[in-house]
Amino acid sequence: MPYASEGTFRECLSLHATHSNHPVTLLTPHLFFSTEGGTLFPLKRRLGCVMMTCDPLLVDEDPAQALQAFDQAHGSDCVVLASITGPVAQILAARGYAVFKLGEEPWVDLSDFQPRGNRGKGIRAARNQALRSGCETGEWSPEALQADRLEIEAVFEEWRGLSILSMEGGILGTNPFADIPGRRFFWVRRNGRLEAVLVATPIRIGVCYYLEDLVYRKDACRGAQELITLASMERLHQDGAERVSLGLVLQRKPERAALGQSSGGFWLAATRTLSRWFYNAQGQDLFRKRFQIATWEPTYFAYRGPRSGPLKHLALPWATLALMASLEPRLRWPHGLVSRPRS
């Protein structure tokens, strides 16, 4: 099969990225399937399945043609695509994939990000409380980032310990020191102590960012999350950025879950269990919708089994287990469970 190098993917990324998970692909090693038209498909294999967690990176090719080439090249495999956008989901549904809604991704227009009205009262109050308690915000330079690396890693480790089961791969993976060009790192400190960290990963450098990681200490001052989110938006806006993604919320509005005629009882039960008990999807939703959201973009999960053979009838449980495995769940002894949203 034709594969491109990671270097080729990096070169195309800076010019053609459109999906918030395109740069996040670089958190972990991937293979990069390439079509004759130059479209790149970042993929892994999990439990024998071909697994993708973003849209294909289109260079100069019709999406339907690129997806056809990818599908034909992997006809004997179970194929799973998670966190894909509506246009890609529609093409896959037409090719016989089962497609279900995974969640929704909130986008903020940075020309209109300041919280206002009744909806913004909670955000403003939380931010002001953090400021009154002595919190300060700032952004690391590359040199200062390396100097504070151990302190940052300690906050990430403490944050992961807030849940009994942490998800450390796939669409939920985190790695603040992965080599992704153009990342920006913001902090909140109180009395010199690091309270929270936010990583803004560029989809298009200087134009569009994904607020990928928002992590905090278990006893962080109240309002630190709201303060650092608004401060990062303000700084990015001042530097000319146009919009930011606040990250996927799993199983948001699941009543609109299916495309086509697929029956997804097993899928819905599995993802609801994941999002309710191990991901705090409700808390994620409540936290994000307090901001000035311009659009909620649906994202989808698509799968099919091998085109032939007995295993094609086991495609749904197989694909679901592969998705769970891609999240790399880790049992942890929590530092202290809290009801505040994990962001």
Image (tube, grey):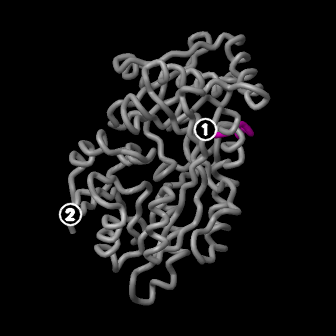
Amino acid type assigned to the residue bearing label 1 in the image: Ala
Amino acid type assigned to the residue bearing label 2 in the image: Glu
Residue 54 sits in which quadrant?
bottom left
Residue that carries the numbered disc 1 in the rendered image: 294
Disc 1 on helix, strand or loop?
Answer: loop
Q: Residue at x 71, y 36 (%)?
A: 340
Residue that carries the numbered disc 2 in the rendered image: 36
Left or right: residue 8 versus residue 21 is: left
Residue 47: image location, x then y, percent: 43, 69
Left or right: residue 134 versus residue 148 is: right
In the rendered image, the quadrant that contains the N terminus is bottom left
In the rendered image, the quadrant that contains the C terminus is top right
Span highlighted in magenta in the image: 337-342
Total of numbered circles in the picture?
2
Residue 100 sits in which quadrant?
bottom right
Q: Is residue 321 magenta?
A: no
